[in-house]
Amino acid sequence: MTGRSHGRHDWLGLTPEVERFGPILVDRIAGALGEAPDALGEARIRELIRTGDAAAWLAYLAALTALVERGREAGVAAPEHVILAEILRDQYRLAPGVLRLGPDDEARSRRLEEMLDPS
Amino acid sequence: MSATRRRARPTRSGGAPLTLHAHAYADPAILERERREVFAKAWIAIGHVSEVREPGDFAAGSIAGEPVVVVRDETGALRAFSNVCRHRAAQLATGSGSCGKVLRCPYHGWTYRLDGTLAAMPEGRGFGEDFDRDAVRLPEFRVDTLGGLVFVNMDPAAEPLREWFGDIAERFEGLGIERLVPVTARDWQPREIMRGLPDVIRSRRLDDARALVPAAETSRMWVSYDHNWKTLADNYLEGYHVPIGHPGLLRLLDYPKYKATLHRRAAWIDGPLRDNPSRDLVERLYQRLQRPMPEFPEELREQWTYIHLWPAQFIDIYPDSIDIWQMHPDGVRRTRTLFMVFRSPSEGVRDRVARRLNSVINSEVMDEDVVLCDGVQAGLESLTYTRGVLNDNENAVGHFHDLLREAVPGIDDGP
């Protein structure tokens, strides 16, 4: 049944695209910003999949969104920046099917939508 | 043959109406036409208004095998969609409940907004840069409510719901079904609970423990019968067989006053209850304990009432509860029936016992009907039988057959 009482592990269905593309995109954006990508990189994603939960995943998405927003403010115009923003936008669009978004997550989602489609 | 001649009711010389040609009960080609020309063009009840009261609430159902889902969207409007994911055809929702802000496919996670548009799909980049996700949306159907039930129609050209059912609509609304509540059965699923317990112990979270207990849903019981759907419908629509086939029912119902009133796409059958006690203990107990639900209309308190809504929706109106049967053709000789029960929200122990006794009595009636319909289905396929005649007490069967002749031209022509 589609229902609000999401299964405890359903959030794992969100992770594949981030696991596949996230590390390289984070590397490049963080590199352009002169930041160390370690806290958001491949090891972090794998750790989350192994031992994390929905709340930790949302916190990770929040950190990725902050990286994208810092990149935008710094004028990072690389395609990687747009791709990561699109992946995050989709994460927030998919998330209500598997977990409950808080007001801060909703706000992040809106900012990503506006960033990708300012009209 | 002209369309006019085709639609005219065939009669025998004595004037008694004739039944449909027996071939109509056994021909797969006719069944396929019925799916397209009868069911896909009719208003079909999918659920009860209480199931879709809040934004995000949904109720899934089907129209002769076509999966549909009704949702209350974020603006508060009711919407009906195809319940088929556009990706690989999985059903998006089953039963009823709340889906929050999106409908998510349980197969690959394609996620739809409550306006039917595609919000996103997992690993979306894997569909290529040029894939136009904005063009993906669930086909939308018409939806409306009448008398506490939510109806869906797949035909954009169909008449509005109230006009469709004609003058029975107002009478139907007077039943107050919207004030009743669906009977629910919490499915505790002990194996599932046991399987989930280790996770709860590990997480030590109250929410995880609560999630083990499934929410109460409308109890939808599906039963399959090895009969053409019209065989079952014909049987429901007439009381002529009651004295022969249902002795127990004859003890309860005042048969001489049993009568069907015909409406545009419906029949209303009054079955007044006898006031003398039955000799059967269960029936006598029912007579003693049953009392009308407070929500129940005054004029129906001393009777059982049966309503047929075209094409295959049957509503048993008892003073103590209301049952809804829906027939879904599942093959030329197979019908899946969906059964839902509604009761008063203020039902007490005595009322519950009376409802249980009612269920015992009517289960026996159903068992008797299945045996009768087994014989009829075999008889309809006999080499020696083509069609029969209808008694005055079978007027609702004749009306049903006329509606079929109108909706499926040629249904009566035979092979």
Image (cartoon, coloured by chain):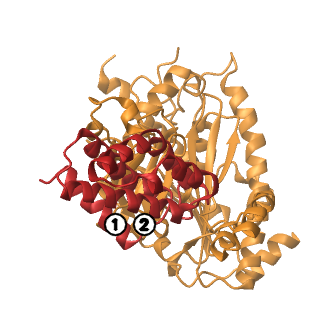
Chain colours: A red, B orange
How many numbered badges does the structure rendering display?
2
Residue furthest left in the image: A119
Image quadrant holding the N terminus of chain A, namely bottom right
What's the amino acid at mark 2? Leu
Discs 1 and 2 share one subunit: yes
- What residue lies at 33% left-to-right and 29% top-to-bottom? B128
Q: Nearer the viewer, residue B183 or B281?
A: B183
Contact (CB < 8 A) between labels 1 and 2? yes
- SS for tag 2? loop
> Mark 1 sits on what residue?
A106
* Mark 1 Cα shell of 10 Å, populated few (<14), some (14-19), many (≥20): some
Identify whether B10 is placed above or below B65: above
Q: Amino acid at mark 1?
A: Glu
Location of mark 2 (residue): A101
Q: Position of residue B77 (x, y in %)?
A: 31, 63
Q: Is residue B346 visible?
A: yes
